[in-house]
Image (tube, rainbow, N blue to C red):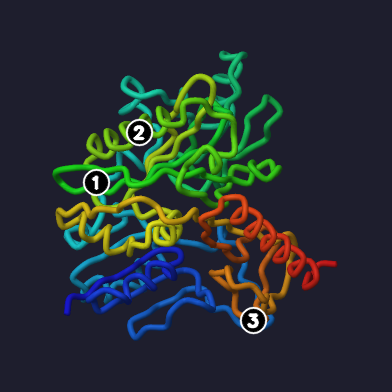
Amino acid sequence: MEKLLLIGIDTRSMLNSALKLDYEVYSTSYFSTSDTPIIKNQKIILKESDGESCGEFENQFDAKEILDISRDYIDEVDYIIPISGISPSDFSKNDRKKILGSVDVADIEDKYRFYKKIKDEFLTPATFSVSDIGEAIEINNSYPDIQFILKPLQGSGGYDVNLLDNDYDFEFNGKEFILQEYVSGINLSSSVLASKSEAKAITHSRLLTMNDFGNDSFIYVGNILPLTEKSIMGKVEKMDELIANMKDTSESLAEKFNLMGSNGVDYILNEKGLHVIEVNPRIQGTFECVEKAYGINMLEAHIKACHGEIIEIGNPKYYAYKKIVYSPTRMKYSQIDLDNIYDLPHTGSITEKDEPLLTIIDKSSDFEKLYEKVESASQIVDRAARINRLDA
């Protein structure tokens, strides 16, 4: 039996799918949710326990640490699937040969290089490379009619993305940033399956950030799919044309950057058109939504694409909605009686304020009922967090 390693921030969802396939599965992850399957070959960095804080993800996560403790697994397995938090570039040239997925990602993960590669072919926000906050403010002053954001040169999930103004006090602290034109509009995403010979956009989704829920933040919250006049949650004319545009653009980008397996393309739609924001050269956060809506094993689809076969997906049977709940307060977790919550903390462990608490995922053929159910669950989780708060 061939051996498969899943490696990244949180492997729970992919583990569930991998265990249905004919592989000996290995897993290395940062998070240790209580609903993560326990397998023989498994390493987890964050050891949750009663009364202990899970800490702050941004300050504690280190991709190198995951790779270091995975060294024996990497040597032993036949295949590796890096997921969120781990880049193919982190592996040695020899180990990259084992990767199932996109491998040559330098021109994608470096957002300035990505901008230079696509700016003459696709609508995309103006982007500048900056060495410090002074240079960013100087560029900002040269374009008085444009609002800019500062965002990390590399990274995903909307972390460390901030609107810029002349009073902005910010230190780069050794990190690299870009200055990018701020595009307001509707956040969208496409999921693409790609092999060496073809690329096929299989679904499109409404991408959600904290901004969509009235918070001044660009951090990723979730997705709703498939994309329809209802699920887009905004006034959009000619929906069919939008879907066709997303499909063509996503497939073109997949071919341009030689993507492999399951990959994502993020967009912002406004009155000026469909803006390409970034490509995510890995299995995306829509993973479980696609599985629920289309009734497929998304990991199997990814692996088959890497081996040259793009499976037939068919039409969605349901809407699916994923929403990450960030803790409104520092709290000690206790069981919440809901049937649609995942990525659950261990009972008694402490989640810090604004850290990811758990994920709500559900499906329904009725969009309004689905949205109402997920938002109701979100309110129940929020109340539970406040009841169990520790900073009162």
Helix, strand or loop under label 2:
helix
Residue 114 circle label: 2
| The N terminus - image quarter | bottom left
Which residue position holds label 1?
Answer: 104
Q: Nearer the viewer, mark 2 or mark 3?
A: 3
Residue 299 in the figure: left or right of residue 1: right
- Residue 354 image-quadrant placement: bottom right
Helix, strand or loop under label 3:
loop
Is tag 1's residue or tag 2's residue first in the polypeptide sequence?
1
Q: Position of residue 389 (x, y in %)?
A: 78, 69
Circles 3 and 1: CB atoms closer than 8 Å = no
Q: Nearer the viewer, mark 3 or mark 1?
A: 3
Circles 1 and 2: CB atoms closer than 8 Å = no
The residue lying toward the viewer, choosing from 142 and 362, is: 362
- Residue 294 image-quadrant placement: bottom left
The residue lying toward the viewer, choosing from 240 and 268, is: 240
| Callout 3 crowding tier (Cα within 10 Å): few <14, some 14–19, many ≥20 | some
View extreme (right): residue: 392
For badge 1, the amino acid type reads Asp
Q: Could you give the CA–CA distance between mark 1 and mark 2, rounded to whole angstroms?
A: 13 Å
Residue ID at (54%, 52%): 222
Is tag 3's residue or tag 1's residue first in the polypeptide sequence?
1
How many numbered marks, from 0 up?
A: 3
Which residue position holds label 3?
Answer: 347
